[in-house]
Image (spheres, rainbow, N blue to C red):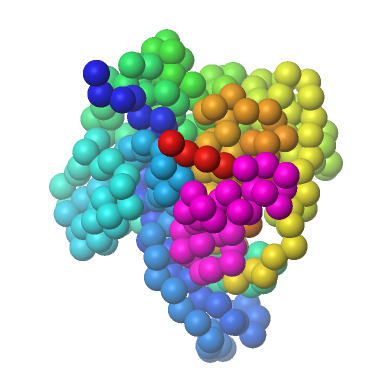
């Protein structure tokens, strides 16, 4: 029997192409032109997590929209070159572009994005069986009906469900949000998203509120990450590193964390893996330019007191 996928990344939109401006003197103003010192064009979004996992030796498929435009063609070829299975991509006629312009600064970045279309088209539901897939990652907590159905089908098929929040603006006061949180086995927000959804001012309070629904790992920027599993709360501080660009760091954190979560490793080690992968990512422009090989990941994890070996 064919080995099941370690993870299927499920994106209700198209894979993003990131256009990253670095070395800016400040934010743009109306009527004033500014110049960047560096420009990087690279795949982003769900591409980052899928590729970062594949580089660590995991078996990964990406399911996202793809069209007949040149951007879609480029992204498909890039995914294939990285060893990500693209056979289940949701193909549509015409354009299916998704582009983000990132204004990157050392501690954070601002985004302007555009998408041609969204929505799950003919999702391969037969993937959602534990004989074919160990786990799925939903890239957003946004209220797509198709994603809710997908999560239910995965749980019914014995497939574990993780979800990122991806700038979700809802709150716990919405019944739909509660249903989506309850359908997950793992929640992966960043600190701003966690506080917004739970309407808490403190990230630790937000963690406790989300952990009522599922295991939770919160990405907390340069402060590292904190998580809660079965009532145990752990924080793992990030290591000081040279920051070139933070675009995609959260996606790479997800990959590192998931690599441990899939093996049922202790919470502290999962958080360290997330920090290691995300921390290496920020050292180069673009989400996956710094995403590590197994050897690089192992060296970075050793600095956290852990190691990584992949057969």
Quarter residue 268 falls in:
top right
**In this picture, is 158 found above or below 10?**
above
Residue 36 seen in the figure: yes
Query: Where residue 245 appears, x then y in whole percent?
Result: 58, 68
**Rendering quarter of residue 200:** top right
Q: Which residues are magenta?
A: 280-307
Asked whether 201 falls inside the magenta stretch, the response is no
Location of residue 43 in the rendering, given as x and y in whole percent from the top left corner: 38, 60
- Give how far across and how far down residue 307 sits, in percent: 62, 43
Position in image of residue 111 (x %, y %): 54, 63
- Which image quarter holds the N terminus? top left
Evaluate whether residue 169 shows in this view: no
Q: Which image quarter is the C terminus in? A: top left
Magenta region includes residue 294? yes
The residue drawn where x is 60% and y is 71% is 244
Q: Residue at x 44, y 19 (%)?
A: 159
Work out whether 119 lies above or below 146: below
Q: Quadrant of residue 217?
A: top right
Observer-nearest of 266 and 90? 266
Please give left or right for residue 255 compared with residue 207 in the image: left
């Amino acid at each position: 029997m064919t080995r099941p996928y370690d993870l299927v990344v499920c994106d209700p939109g198209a894979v993003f192409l990131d256009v990253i401006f670095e070395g800016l003197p400040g934010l743009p103003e109306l009527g004033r032109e500014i110049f960047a010192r560096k420009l990087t064009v690279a795949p982003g979004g769900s591409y980052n997590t899928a590729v970062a996992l594949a580089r660590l030796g995991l078996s990964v498929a990406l399911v996202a929209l793809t069209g007949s435009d040149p951007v879609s063609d480029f992204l498909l070829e890039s995914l294939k070159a990285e060893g990500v299975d693209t056979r289940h991509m949701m193909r549509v006629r015409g354009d299916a572009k998704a582009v983000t312009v990132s204004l990157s600064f050392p501690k954070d970045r601002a985004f302007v994005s555009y998408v041609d279309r969204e929505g799950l088209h003919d999702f391969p539901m037969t993937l959602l069986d534990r004989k074919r897939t160990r786990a799925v990652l939903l890239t957003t907590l946004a209220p797509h009906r198709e994603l809710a159905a997908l999560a239910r089908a995965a749980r019914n098929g014995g497939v574990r469900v993780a979800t990122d929040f991806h700038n979700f603006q809802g709150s716990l006061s919405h019944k739909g949000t509660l249903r989506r949180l309850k359908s997950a086995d793992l929640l992966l927000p960043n600190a701003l998203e966690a506080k917004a959804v739970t309407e808490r001012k403190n990230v630790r309070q937000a963690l406790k509120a989300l952990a009522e629904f599922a295991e939770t790992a919160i990405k907390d920027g340069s402060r590292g990450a904190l998580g809660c599993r079965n009532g145990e709360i752990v924080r793992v501080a990030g290591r000081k590193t040279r920051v070139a660009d933070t675009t995609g760091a959260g996606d790479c954190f997800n990959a590192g964390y998931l690599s441990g979560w899939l093996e049922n490793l202790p919470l502290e080690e999962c958080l360290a893996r997330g920090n290691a992968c995300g921390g290496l990512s920020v050292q180069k422009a673009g989400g996956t330019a710094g995403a590590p090989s197994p050897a690089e990941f192992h060296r970075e994890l050793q600095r956290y007191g852990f190691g990584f070996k992949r057969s």
